Image: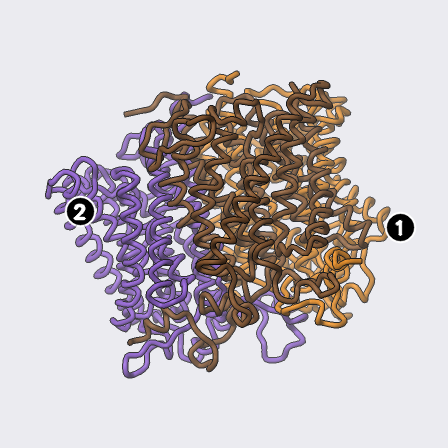
Chain colours: A purple, B orange, C brown
Amino acid sequence: MNAGTDVALNTIWVVIAAAMVLFMEGGFSLLEAGFVRTKNAVNVTMKIFVDLTVGVLAFFLIGFGIMFGKDYGGLISFNFWGASQSLHIDFNLPLSAYVLFQIGFAIAAISIISGAVAERMSFKAYILIAVFVAAILYPISGHWVWNPDGWLAQLGMKDFAGSAAIHALGGSAALAFAKVLGPRRGRFNTDGDVNVFAPSNIPLASAGTFILWFGWFGFNAGSTLSASDVNLSIIALNTMLAAAAGGTSAMIYTMFRYGKADPSMTMNGALAGLVAITAGCAFVTPYSSILIGLVAGLLVIWGTLAIDKLQVDDPVGAVAVHGINGSFGTLAVGLLDQKEGLLTTGQFHLLGVQLLGVIVVVVWGYVLSYGAAKVIEATVGLRVNDAEEEEGLDMAMHGIPAYNELERFSDQPGMDPSLLLKTGSGD
Amino acid sequence: MNAGTDVALNTIWVVIAAAMVLFMEGGFSLLEAGFVRTKNAVNVTMKIFVDLTVGVLAFFLIGFGIMFGKDYGGLISFNFWGASQSLHIDFNLPLSAYVLFQIGFAIAAISIISGAVAERMSFKAYILIAVFVAAILYPISGHWVWNPDGWLAQLGMKDFAGSAAIHALGGSAALAFAKVLGPRRGRFNTDGDVNVFAPSNIPLASAGTFILWFGWFGFNAGSTLSASDVNLSIIALNTMLAAAAGGTSAMIYTMFRYGKADPSMTMNGALAGLVAITAGCAFVTPYSSILIGLVAGLLVIWGTLAIDKLQVDDPVGAVAVHGINGSFGTLAVGLLDQKEGLLTTGQFHLLGVQLLGVIVVVVWGYVLSYGAAKVIEATVGLRVNDAEEEEGLDMAMHGIPAYNELERFSDQPGMDPSLLLKTGSGD
Amino acid sequence: MNAGTDVALNTIWVVIAAAMVLFMEGGFSLLEAGFVRTKNAVNVTMKIFVDLTVGVLAFFLIGFGIMFGKDYGGLISFNFWGASQSLHIDFNLPLSAYVLFQIGFAIAAISIISGAVAERMSFKAYILIAVFVAAILYPISGHWVWNPDGWLAQLGMKDFAGSAAIHALGGSAALAFAKVLGPRRGRFNTDGDVNVFAPSNIPLASAGTFILWFGWFGFNAGSTLSASDVNLSIIALNTMLAAAAGGTSAMIYTMFRYGKADPSMTMNGALAGLVAITAGCAFVTPYSSILIGLVAGLLVIWGTLAIDKLQVDDPVGAVAVHGINGSFGTLAVGLLDQKEGLLTTGQFHLLGVQLLGVIVVVVWGYVLSYGAAKVIEATVGLRVNDAEEEEGLDMAMHGIPAYNELERFSDQPGMDPSLLLKTGSGD
C-alpha cells in the first residue's frame, strides 16, 4: 500500500530530520568527552548512552503521551504508552514519524544536563535523572508550549523548535543539578577563585560541534514537520547564519579581549547561535538571524563568567549555551518576529508572552529539578565519593580508561580492566 | 529531462539512504580503531578503506550481477558487469540508485569481518578476502534471499534489511576467518584463561557507534526502496527502539552482574539491537521491537563469553553482535511477525522458513569462508609473523603509528616513517 | 501556505544536500587536525571555524551577489547583500535554499587553503584570507563558470559541481599562499631533502575522510538543484565509484612501489577521486568514473612528490588533491563526456574549452592569491615568528594544547591555559 505523495514527502523529510537529530547525541557525547578531563571522558560518553537507551524508552512509553495526548486544562495529558494511542494532533504525517522526531527532541533536553553534571555525579543518579526528565519534567512543560491545547501555546507563545521548550528547560535543569551537586573538587578556591580544568581533547570536542551543527538543520528545519512548508529553506539558512554569527562574535571577542582566539568559546559561540535561533528560525529574517547570533556569541562568554561568579561548576558551559541563550532566543522572537515583534512592528504583546513563557519554563525546570536532585541525594545519593572523583569516574564507574596505550591490560598490576571482560576470562 | 514525482521522490530517498549506509563504513572504522590496541588502529582503519575501495569495485563489477541478475534455478546469476545489465527486478527507481544502495550493503558485510580478524591478519590476505566476499560469498547467498527468484525468497523467507543476508552471513564468515587465523598472541593462556586486551580509545569507539546508529536509519528505512511505503517511518521508529532497548539491557545487566556499566558492552548492545531488528523492522510492532532489542542486548554479552570459551579470538565482538544477533533477529521475525509470527498468530510455517534460512546462510558463510581462509593460508599466507604482530600491524604493514606525538619523525632513529613520504624526501 | 510538490521536493533535497556539504567542514577539520603535528591541531581546527563563521558571513553578504547577481560583461556582478536581492537565475527552488547550498560551496573553497598553510600562518592573516576568498576570489571566477551569463559558461565549459570552480581554484590559491609563506621550519634541508613530519592522528584523519566522502554525495548529487533530474542517482553512483577507484589505485600503487599500503595516500587517493569526478559526475558513465578515479589516485601521489620537489610545503597535500585533480577532472570531461568528449565522440571543441577554463581559473587563483599574500605579508604579517612556530600554534595562538592529559592545568607551572578561562578565574 502506498501513501499519497504529500504524506510520502513529509515522511521521508521527517525521518531524515529525525535521524539527524538523533545523531546530535553523538555530537553531545564527543563535545563533552573532549571538554572534560581525560579521567571522566568515558563516563560522560556513557551518560549520553543512558539518554539514548533508558531515556528513549522512558519518553516513548511515558513522556510522549503526557506531552501530546488529549489535554486536561492546558496542563497535562495521561495517554501513556503514547505511541500506541491516537494522537491528539493532526498532521499530514504518520504518527510513528512524529514520535521518532519527538524522541530526538526529548533526549536532547536530557543531554544538555549531562555536561553540567559531568565529572562528579553518580552514574545511578544520572539514570534516574534521565528517566525523570524524559518522563516528567520535559513532557509537562513541553505540553504547555507545544501541545496545541497547552496553556502557553494558547496564549500565543512562539517557540518554533524549542529555544524555550528544550534549551531553556534543559539549561535551567542543568543549573539546578549542578548547584545541588556542588562543584568538582578543587574547582573553586576558598577565596572564590576559579581553577581552570582544561579540556582534554579539542579535536574530539570539535568533532562533536560539527555533528551538532549538522544535526541542527534537522532539528530546526525538520520542525516544519512538512516538506511543503515554504519557510523550510529560510529556516535552514537562518540556522546557518546564526551559528556563523555566534561563532564569529565569540571568536573575535576573545581575540580582542584576551589576545587569543579561544577554541572552547568559539565552539560554544556557534552552538549558542544555534540555540538562540531555534525559537525564531521560522519567524525572523536572515539579517535578524545574524543579529541574534552575534548577541548569542557574546552572551555565552559573559554567561560563562557569570556562572563562575555564582560558584556553580558547569564543566562544559551547558547553562550558558542552552539556558541563557535558549532564554535569549525565545525573547528575541518577541523583538524580531516579522509579524508581531516589538522592534519590527512596535507591538508589545508577543514579547510579553515570550517573557512569561521563558520565566515559566525556567522556573519549572529549575524548581522541579532542584527538588528531584534533593530527593535523589537523600535516597540513592547524587554524587560519587571523594576517592572516586579523584581517581576519575571512568575507572571508578566503568573500570576502563578513555585512552589506553598499554599493550596488555592484564600485565598492569593495579589497573582494573573492564570487569565484564575480566569476568569473561574463564570463571 | 525530468523524472516523474514518484520516481524523483524514491530516487532522493534511496540516494540519501545510500549515503548514510556508506557513511557506516566510517562507523565501523572508528569503532574498530577504538576497540583494538593502539598499535593496530591504523591497520583496521586501512581494512575499512579496502572495503570502500577494492570491495566496492568488486561488488560493482561482479557481485551485483551475480546477486540481482537473471536467475538460474534459484541459485545464481551470471550478469557480470552488473550495473550495465538490465536488472531482473522492477522498481520505480533508477537502476543506478539501486546499485549504489546495494554497494553499501555489500561492503557492510565485508566490514563485519574486518573487526574479527583485527590485529593479526596480513593486509594482502584481507584484500583477497574483501574481493572474495564482495564478488562471491555475499552475492550468492544474497541471491537466494533477496533476488525475487532466489530459492529462499521463493520459500517466503522474510529478511527485510538483512539480519540474515548481511549480518548472520558476515558474522559466520568472521567466525570462520577468526578460527583459522587463530587467536592473537597471548590472548588465551594454556589453561584456557582469557587475557584482556583493553580497548585503546573509548571516545573513538563511541564516535563509530554513533555513526553506525545514524547510518542504520538509511540501512533499514532505506530498504523500502520507496518513499511512499507506508511502513517507512514505523521501520525507522522500530530501529530506534530496538537499539535503545539493546543498549539498555546490556548496560543494566553489566551494572547488576558486574557492578559497573560496561562501555564496550553498552555500545555492542545497542548495535546488537540494531542488527536484530534489521530483519523484522518492517514486520513487527514497536513493542516487539523493544522486546527484540532487550534480548539482543543480553545475547551479545552471553555470546561474547561463549566465543571466548570456544577459544576463538574476536577483538571487537563482531561474531556476537552480527552473527548471533543477525541469526536471532531473523528467527524473531518468525516469532513476532504481525501476519505470520508464531507468538502473534500461532502459525509455525514462517518460523520454520526463517530457521531454515538462517541455517543455510550461516553454514554457507562459515564453510565457504573456512575454505577460503585455508586456501589463502596455503598460498599467500593469512597471518603476519610473530615479530610483526608484536610490533603491531601499524608499523609493520603501514609504516606509521596511529598517534604520533613526536615533533619530527626523522629525528627518531629506529622508527619508520611512511615509506612513501620518506621516498618523497628526494631520492 | 504550502509550496507545490515539485518545489517542496527540490527544497528538501537541496536543504539536506546543503547540510551534508556544510558537514564537510567537519571533515576538513578532522582530516587536517589528524595530518598536522599535534602542536598545531587546535590551530587548523580553528581555521575551519573561521571558514564556518567569518567566511560564511562574507560570502552571504558580499560573495553571493558578486557570483550570481545580474551579470556585467560576463565578468562580475555587484548585487551585494546577495540573499536579499532577487536572483538573476531561475530555479524551481526557493532562493534561500540556493544561497545555503552555495555557502557550503564557498567555504569548501576556503577550507582547501587552510590545510596547505597549516602550522605556520598567523591566525589573523588567515581570517583576512578567508574574507578575501569568500568575498572576492571565489565569487568572481565562480561568476565566470557558473553564472549563466559568465563568459566561461557562455563558451560551454562544463564543470558540474566544481572541479574547476572550487577545487582547482582552491588548490591554486593554496599553492600561492604556501609558496609565499615558505616551508615549515626544518621541512627542507639545504640540499633540498625533505624531512618528514608524520601525521599526528591517523584515526582522526580517517574520520575526516569519511565525513568528506559522505558530504560529497550532497556536493555532487545536490548540484542537480532538482530532485527530478534523471541524472541524480547516476551522479551519486559515479561519485562513489571514482572515490573507490582513487583509493584503490593509490593504495595498490604504494603497496607495490614502496612495500607498504600508505594510509595518508589512500585517504588522499579517495579524496582525489572525489575531486576529479566532481566536474564530470553528470556527464560521464560509471566506467569512465572508475577510470577517472584510478588516474586521480596516481596523480595525487605523483603530484605530492612534485610539490615536494618544488620545495613548496603543503602539510596535508591540498594542492595535489584539489589543485591537480581538480584540473585533471575538468579536462577529463573534455575527454569522456558522453556527448562531446574527445575519446567518446572524437570532438575536440569541449576539451579546448575545458582546457581554457582550467588555465583561466588556475592562473586567476594563483596570481590573485599571490598578490593578496604579498599585501598581507607587508601589512599585518603572514607568518608566525620562529618561537611561535617552534612552540606550536596551539599554545601560541590559542593558549591550549589539542590533547591535555594533565589533571589540573593550573597546577602545571609554565603552561598557559586558555586565557579566557584563566581570566574567568576571578579577576
- Identified by mark 2, the residue type is Gln
Q: In the rendering, at what x and y percent does residue A52 appear?
A: 44, 52
Kindly report the distance in space between the C-alpha atoms of the residues bearing marks 1 and 2: 74 Å
- Quickly name the residue at label 2: A354
- Quickly name the residue at label 1: B378
Query: Does residue C149 appear to the left or right of B400 in the view shown?
Result: left
Question: What kind of element bears circle 1?
Answer: helix
The residue closer to the viewer here, B326 or B409, is B409
At a point 60% along the width and 59% down the height, the residue shown is: C182
- Identified by mark 1, the residue type is Ala
Query: Does residue A360 appear to the left or right of A107 in the view shown?
Result: left
* Farthest-out residue, right: B379
**Chain designation of label 1:** B
**Chain designation of label 2:** A
Q: In the rendering, at what x and y percent does residue B276 appear?
A: 56, 44
Query: Does residue A351 appear to the left or right of C299 in the view shown?
Result: left
Question: Visible in this render: residue B361?
Answer: no
Query: Does residue B49 appear to the left or right of A271 in the view shown?
Result: right
The residue closer to the viewer here, A414 or B192, is A414
At a point 49% along the width and 54% down the height, the residue shown is: A207
Q: In the rendering, at what x and y percent does residue B287 appear?
A: 44, 41
Q: Which quarter of the rendering shows the C terminus of chain C?
A: bottom left
Q: Disc 1 vs disc 2: which is toward the camera?
A: 2
Q: How crowded is mark 2: few (under 14 residues within 10 Å), some or many (20 or more)?
A: many
At a point 65% along the width and 47% down the height, the residue shown is: C268
Q: In the rendering, at what x and y percent does residue C64 appear?
A: 40, 36
Question: What kind of element bears circle 2?
Answer: helix
Above/below status of A392 relative to B349: below
The residue closer to the viewer here, C31 or B235, is C31
Above/below status of A390 relative to B289: below
